[in-house]
C-alpha cells in the first residue's frame, strides 16, 4: 500500500516537472520570431513535416521547408524591431492627423496604381523569360482579384492598371540577385515614374529566388531601387509550381504597400503590427490547415497573402492589413 502511494507521488512529480519544463520552453520561444532570410525556423517548425526533395527554377532543396528556411521564398529585406517601431510611431502620428476611424479609410477600389512591367529576358521565348503579354495581363487580373476580395478577404482600396511594358534582353540582368549590381543597373536603366508608380521587373534571379520588394518608407532614401522583382515563371501559367498562380506578385506588392510577413515578429505582442492577423511563430509552407504555432488565440494565418503558403492556399488580406496599406501608401507614396 505504502509502495503504491510512493509510485503515485513519483508520477505526479514527474508530470509536474514536464509541465514546468514545457511552459519555460514556450516562454523563451515567445519573444523570438522568424528573422527572415537565411535563418533557420524556430523549434515549433516540427509541427510541419518535411516532405521530400523540392525543385524550383532548376534549384533543388532537400525539402520545401529547406527552401523556405533558405529565404528564397521571398528575399525582401527583414525590418528589425527598432525600424518597425519607428515606422509604427510615425504611422500613428500620421493616422492621428488624418483621422484614424474606419470611415477615414478609402473605400474599396478607390486608389488606382499604375504598373510598368519590365520583362528582362536572355532571348526570345517563354523559357528565356520573354513572357507573353497574355501572362502579364493575367497577372494584373490576379492582382485585382486579390486586392478586391474577389478571392476572399477584405476589399482593399487598391486596383492595378498596366501602363506600359518594356522588353530587354540582357543575360546579366536576367539573373540579377537581390542587392546585386545587376539589379541596380537594370533599375537605373528601366525604372519610370515616382513613389506612386509600381515598377515590376520579371527576371530569373539566382538561387531559385521567387521575388522581393521595397517598403514604402525606403523610397525617399533610394528612389531608384523602388519596386518589385519577380521570378518570370511565378506569373499565372508559369512553371514555378506551386508558386505559379500569380500570388508571388500579390505578396510582394503587399510589401510594396507596407505590409510585413504574418510571421514578422513571431508570437510577440506586436507581431506583424496588424491586429486581425493571428500571431505566427514561423513561415508556413504547403497548406497546413489547422497550424497553430503561437499559444495566443487564433490559428496561424496560412491563407493570408503575406504568409509563405502555396499560391493555391493563400487568398486573403484582412481589414487590418488593408487599413495599414491604405495609410502607409498615402503617407510615403502619395497614392
Ligand atoms: Ca497580427
Ligand atoms: Ca494561435
Ligand atoms: Zn515576403
Image (tube, helix red, strand yellow):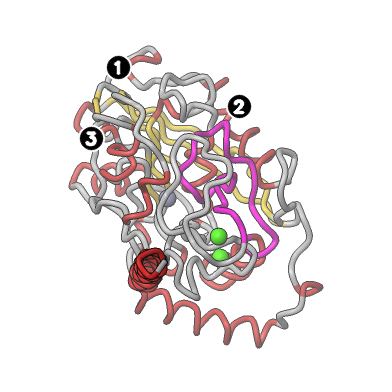
User: What residue did someone put label 3 on?
Assistant: 207
Please tell me how crowded label 1 is: few (under 14), some (14-19), or many (20+) other residues with Cα within 10 Å.
Answer: some
Residue 256 point in image, percent of width and height: 48, 55
Quadrant in which the N terminus is drawn:
bottom left
| Nearer to us: label 2 or label 1 | 2
Q: Secondary structure at mark 3?
A: helix
Would residue 162 be visible to someone looking at this image? yes
Residue 294, relative to residue 114: is it above or below? below
Whether label 1 touches label 3, CB < 8 Å: no
Name the residue located 29 percent from the left edge and 45 percent from the top edge. Answer: 69
Name the residue located 33 percent from the left edge and 69 percent from the top edge. Answer: 21
Quadrant in which the C terminus is drawn:
bottom right
Name the residue located 44 percent from the left edge and 23 percent from the top edge. Answer: 241
Residue 112, relative to residue 2: is it above or below? above
User: What residue did someone put label 2 on?
Assistant: 138
Residue 81 point in image, percent of width and height: 36, 75
User: What residue did someone put label 1 on?
Assistant: 123
Please give the range of residues in magenta. Answer: 298-321
Which callout, 2 or 1, points at the residue further toward the start of the chain?
Answer: 1
Which callout, 1 or 3, points at the residue further toward the start of the chain?
Answer: 1
Residue 125, relative to residue 17: is it above or below? above
Which callout, 2 or 3, points at the residue further toward the start of the chain?
Answer: 2
Whole-number angstrom distance, CA of label 2 to CA of label 3: 26 Å
Amino acid at each position: 500500500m505504502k509502495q503504491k502511494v510512493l509510485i503515485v507521488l513519483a508520477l505526479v512529480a514527474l508530470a509536474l516537472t514536464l509541465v514546468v519544463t514545457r511552459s519555460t520552453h514556450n516562454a523563451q520561444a515567445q519573444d523570438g520570431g522568424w528573422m527572415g532570410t537565411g535563418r533557420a525556423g524556430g523549434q515549433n517548425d516540427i509541427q510541419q513535416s518535411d516532405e521530400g526533395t523540392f525543385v524550383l527554377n532548376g534549384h533543388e532543396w532537400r525539402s520545401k521547408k529547406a527552401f523556405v528556411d533558405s529565404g528564397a521564398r521571398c528575399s525582401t529585406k527583414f525590418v528589425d524591431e527598432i525600424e518597425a517601431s519607428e515606422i509604427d510611431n510615425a504611422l500613428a502620428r500620421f493616422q492621428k492627423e488624418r483621422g484614424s476611424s474606419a470611415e477615414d479609410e478609402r473605400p474599396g477600389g478607390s486608389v488606382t496604381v499604375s504598373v510598368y512591367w519590365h520583362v528582362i529576358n536572355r532571348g526570345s521565348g517563354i523559357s528565356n523569360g520573354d513572357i507573353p503579354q497574355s501572362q502579364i495581363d493575367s497577372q494584373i487580373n490576379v492582382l485585382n482579384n486579390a486586392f478586391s476580395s474577389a478571392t476572399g478577404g477584405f476589399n482593399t482600396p487598391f486596383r492595378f492598371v498596366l501602363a506600359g511594358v518594356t522588353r530587354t534582353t540582357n543575360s546579366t540582368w536576367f539573373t540579377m540577385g537581390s542587392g546585386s549590381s545587376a539589379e541596380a543597373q537594370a533599375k537605373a536603366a528601366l525604372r519610370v515614374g515616382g513613389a506612386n508608380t509600381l515598377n515590376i521587373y520579371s527576371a530569373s534571379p539566382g538561387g531559385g529566388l521567387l521575388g522581393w520588394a521595397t517598403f514604402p518608407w525606403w523610397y525617399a532614401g533610394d528612389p531608384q531601387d523602388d519596386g518589385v522583382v519577380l521570378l518570370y515563371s511565378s506569373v499565372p501559367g508559369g512553371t514555378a509550381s506551386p508558386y505559379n498562380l500569380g500570388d508571388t506578385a500579390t505578396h510582394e506588392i503587399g510589401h510594396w504597400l507596407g505590409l510585413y510577413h504574418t510571421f514578422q515578429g513571431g508570437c510577440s505582442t506586436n507581431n506583424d503590427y496588424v491586429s486581425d492577423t493571428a500571431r505566427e511563430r514561423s513561415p508556413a509552407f504547403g497548406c497546413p490547415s489547422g497550424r497553430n504555432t503561437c499559444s495566443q488565440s487564433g490559428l496561424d494565418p496560412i491563407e493570408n497573402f503575406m504568409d509563405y503558403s502555396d499560391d493555391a492556399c493563400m487568398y486573403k488580406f484582412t481589414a487590418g492589413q488593408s487599413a495599414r496599406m491604405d495609410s502607409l501608401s498615402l503617407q510615403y507614396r502619395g497614392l
